[in-house]
Structures are given as structure tokens and as C-alpha cells.
Amino acid sequence: MRKEPMPSEASPSLRQSLVVRLRFICKPRMVWKAFVAAGLVGTVLVALNQGDVWWSGHVTSRVLVKSLLTPIIPFCITLLGAFLNSGPVVRAEHLRPGWVVVRRSGLIALCVGSAIILLNHGDALLARAITPQLVVKMLVTPCVPFCVSFYGAYAAYRQALVEQQHTTGMA
């Protein structure tokens, strides 16, 4: 009797592909780039979403927690963009960001941007306290995950180029 694989089990090639991608994004250079994105973009997000509260001096524990946790978002999205744009390829040029990466980054921006808007401005939206300042914040917010995701894909491409040059230089 032939044993059928469980539907929840990943095929060996899928599992191998995931392991290759995870090893790729866990390299120190990729993690460092994600930390840089988290620092720079996280600061922009905090200034955009909580800057007026910080500036007015009405900082609550909720605002403090939001401000401290916000840099995690660009860190994770940078690694997600790199993960989705990596894989077992023969040449690094196959990872060059193109329209597929733009569409993928747009989808990530839509999903993550919506979640960020709901987390940061959900109370104002429910109270129908929509101001022009809030509209600007909500329009700019999805741009951040788009840019960070695209940066992650580009960083993966550059990392693959460096590795390809290193291996061809050694051969």
C-alpha cells in the first residue's frame, strides 16, 4: 500500500526552497540592512503617526509602546521583501526587481498599510474625527511598507550579486 503524504506536509522541494530562502535572509548583511531600514523608516513612521503627540508633550504609555514597537514593522517587511525575492536561482540577475516585485510590494503595502492605519488611527476613524492632517497621515502610511518591501527585494538582489561574484572569483 502506497503512503499518501499528508496535505499539511510540505513537499521536499518546497521545504528545501524555504530553507534556502530563510538561510539567505538570516545572513548578517541582510539582517543589518533590515535593522537600518527599521531604524530609519521606523523613525519616520513614529514621527508621522505619533509625532504630534510627542511634540505636544501628551505622551501616554500607549503612545510610548506604539513608538517603541513601530520599528519592528519595517524590519519584518524588509526581510519579507527579501524572502519573497530570493530562492534557488542559477544567476543573481534573475532576482533583479521588476514589475513582479512592484506588484508584490503594492500588495504588501495594501495589507500592511491598512493594518498600520487601523492600529494608529482606528479610534479617530471610529469616532469620525477625520481631519486633513489625519487624511495626509493615512495616505502616506502605505508608502512606507511599499518602499521597505521594495528595498528588501533590492537588498536580496544585491546580496545575491555579491555572493555570485564571490563564488565566481573563487572558482
Image (cartoon, rainbow, N blue to C red):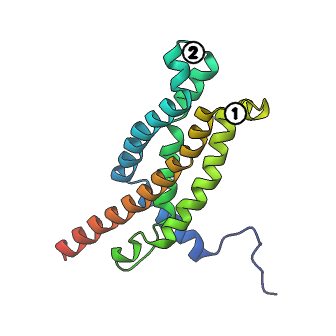
Q: Nearer the viewer, residue 86 or 1?
A: 86
Distance from Cα at disc 1 to Cα at disc 2: 21 Å
56 to 154, vertically: above or below: above
Which numbered dot is residue 59? 2
Q: Which mark is residue 36?
A: none
Q: Which one is in front in this view, the residue at disc 1 or the one at disc 2?
A: 1
Q: Amino acid at mark 2?
A: Val
Q: Examine the rendering and report whether any part of residue 22 can be seen.
A: no
Q: Which residue is mark 1?
A: 130
Q: Amino acid at mark 1?
A: Ile
In which quadrant will I find the N terminus? bottom right
Q: Nearer the viewer, residue 75 or 149?
A: 149
Left/right of residue 26 with respect to residue 132 in the rendered view? left
Residue 147 vertical placement versus 49 (above, below) = below
**Is 68 placed above or below 22 here?**
above
The answer to whether residue 115 of the structure is visible from this angle is yes
**Quadrant location of the C terminus?**
bottom left
Residue projecting furthest to the right: 1
* Residue in the image at 29% along x and 68% along y: 161
Few, some or many C-alpha atoms within 10 Å of disc 1 (few <14, some 14-19, many ≥20)?
Answer: few
User: Would you say 145 lies left or right of 5 here?
Assistant: left
Give the image location of residue 48, x and y in percent: 51, 33
**Of helix, strand and loop, which one carries label 2?**
loop
Q: Residue at x 58, y 32 (%)?
A: 133
The residue carrying pointer 2 sits among few (fewer than 14), some (14 to 19) or many (20 or more) residues within 10 Å by Cα, namely some
- State the residue in front, 31 or 139: 139
As helix, strand or loop, the secondary structure at mark 1 comes to: loop
> How far across and how far down the image is residue 90, in percent?
37, 80
